[in-house]
Image (cartoon, rainbow, N blue to C red):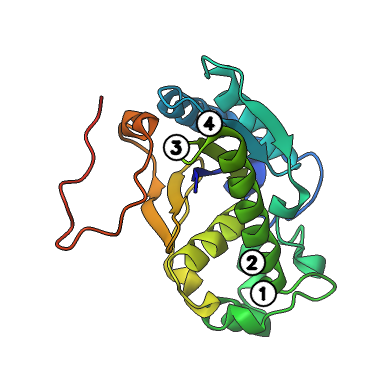
Amino acid sequence: MATVILVRHGRTTANAAGLLAGRAAGVSLDQIGCGQAAFTGDRLAVVPLAGVVSSPLERCQQTAQFILERQAGNPSALDEPDLTECDYGQWQGRMLSDLATEDLWAAVQSQPSAVVFPGGESMAAMQARSVAAIRRHDAAFEAEYGPGAVWAAVSHGDIIKSILADALGMHLDLFQRINVGPASVSIVHYGALRPSVLATNTDAGDLSWLSKGIKTNDAPVGGGAGHTAQ
């Protein structure tokens, strides 16, 4: 299968204020977030991307544009509603400090598989739709460009954490152990036998090794020799 680079959007005005933006319109990258997204675009510039798939929300669209502008080729640009932010329902637009006093907060931290946000979405449904979307696009990019294809998906923190949890074979109740910072890069290769998580939550480092493609062999016993930059 192909390889997906999971990119969280850069820091937003809501992130800086400690506000749960959810799906609210008009939440854009702040100055720091623009710098983060530009740097991530620079990191990905050495990787010829087959396409960039993005959540339709503004902050992800902005981040995706920073990536697309730095690509030497002409990768496809697609919106994917199933990669949009979780529907936090009545929690949307509230301060995280206030939400931390809610009874539901403890379940979000320790048993997210049982959480349904009031007036919103369950975290299990959030994971199911986002994982299905990633696997669907991954198969499509492989079918069109071959198993060496590399593509990027720009989405949100909880979405990417849930995708990584699935790829790692973790129960959703453990996904809060994963950190995904603003404009961070995580990498998953969906091999024939199992997904392989190549990186999580990176905000620096050379990615040129991805341009060589990922081999689909069995996992090397002992860890293998690793990859080398071009």
Residue 79 or 155: which is nearer the viewer?
A: 79
Work out whether 154 lies above or below 74. Answer: below
**Residue underneath mark 1:** 124
Which callout, 3 or 2, points at the residue further toward the start of the chain?
Answer: 2
Q: Determine which residue is flagged by label 3.
A: 148
- Picture quarter containing residue 91? bottom right
The amino acid at mark 2 is Gln
The residue that label 2 is drawn on is 127
Residue 106 percent location from the top left of the image: 57, 82
For the residues labelled 3 and 2, the Cα–Cα distance comes to 26 Å
Residue 108 drawn at (x, y percent): 60, 77
| Viewer-side label of 3, 2 | 3
Q: Given this view, does label 4 or label 2 mark the residue nearer the observer? A: 2
Q: Give residue 68's position: percent from left, percent from top.
A: 59, 23
Disc 4 and disc 1: Cα gap in Å?
29 Å
Residue 203 vs 88, above or below: the answer is above
- Local crowd size for mark 2, using a 10 Å CA cut-off: few (<14), some (14–19), many (≥20): many
Viewer-side residue, 172 vs 49: 49
Decide if residue 153 is in sight here.
Answer: no
Closer to the chain start, of discs 4 and 1, is 4
For disc 4, the marked residue is 37
Q: Secondary structure at mark 3?
A: loop
Q: Is residue 70 above or below residue 132?
A: above
Residues under labels 4 and 3: Cα distance?
25 Å
